């Protein structure tokens, strides 16, 4: 085999490895369960503001 052919084959293999790893990483990112803190209820929030201003 020619040196150029070996270099092309190695480059294609490295490219495929990087592509597969990128797709796996993206897939894991989309599969991650994101959570959001619950919004505090309005009555509790109003009471906390009143206690803060009474100081």
Image (cartoon, grey):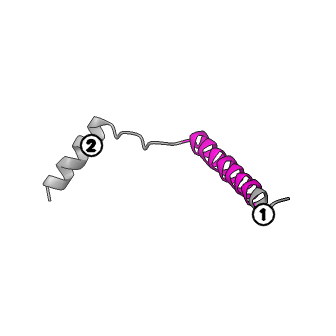
**Stretch in magenta:** 7-33
User: Label 2 belongs to which residue?
Assistant: 45
Q: How many marks?
A: 2
Position of 49 compared to 5: left or right? left
Classed neighbour count for the residue bearing mark 1: other residues with Cα under 10 Å, few (<14), some (14–19), many (≥20): few
At x 44%, y 42%, the residue is: 36
> Of the numbered discs in the image, which one, if any, rests on residue 3?
1
* Towards the viewer: 14 or 31: 14
User: Which quadrant is home to the N terminus?
Assistant: bottom right
Direction top: furthest residue: 42
Asked if residue 26 is among those painted magenta in the image, a careful observer would answer yes
- x%, y% of residue 50? 18, 48
| Residue 18 to residue 33: above or below | below
Classed neighbour count for the residue bearing mark 2: other residues with Cα under 10 Å, few (<14), some (14–19), many (≥20): few
| Residue 6 to residue 45: above or below | below
User: Quadrant of the rendered structure where residue 39 is?
Assistant: top left
* Towards the viewer: 38 or 36: 36
SS of the residue under disc 2: helix
- x%, y% of residue 51? 20, 52
> Of the numbered discs in the image, which one, if any, rests on residue 16?
none
Magenta stretch mostly in which secondary structure? helix
SS of the residue under disc 1: helix
* Towards the viewer: 37 or 15: 15
- Which of the two discs, 2 and 1, labels the residue nearer the N terminus? 1
- x%, y% of residue 12? 71, 51
Direction right: furthest residue: 1
């Amino acid at each position: 085999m020619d040196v150029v052919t070996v270099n092309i084959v190695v480059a294609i293999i490295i490219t495929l490895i990087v592509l597969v790893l990128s797709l796996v990483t993206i897939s894991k990112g989309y599969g991650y369960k994101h959570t959001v803190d619950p919004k505090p209820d309005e009555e509790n929030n109003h009471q906390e503001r009143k206690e803060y201003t009474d100081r």
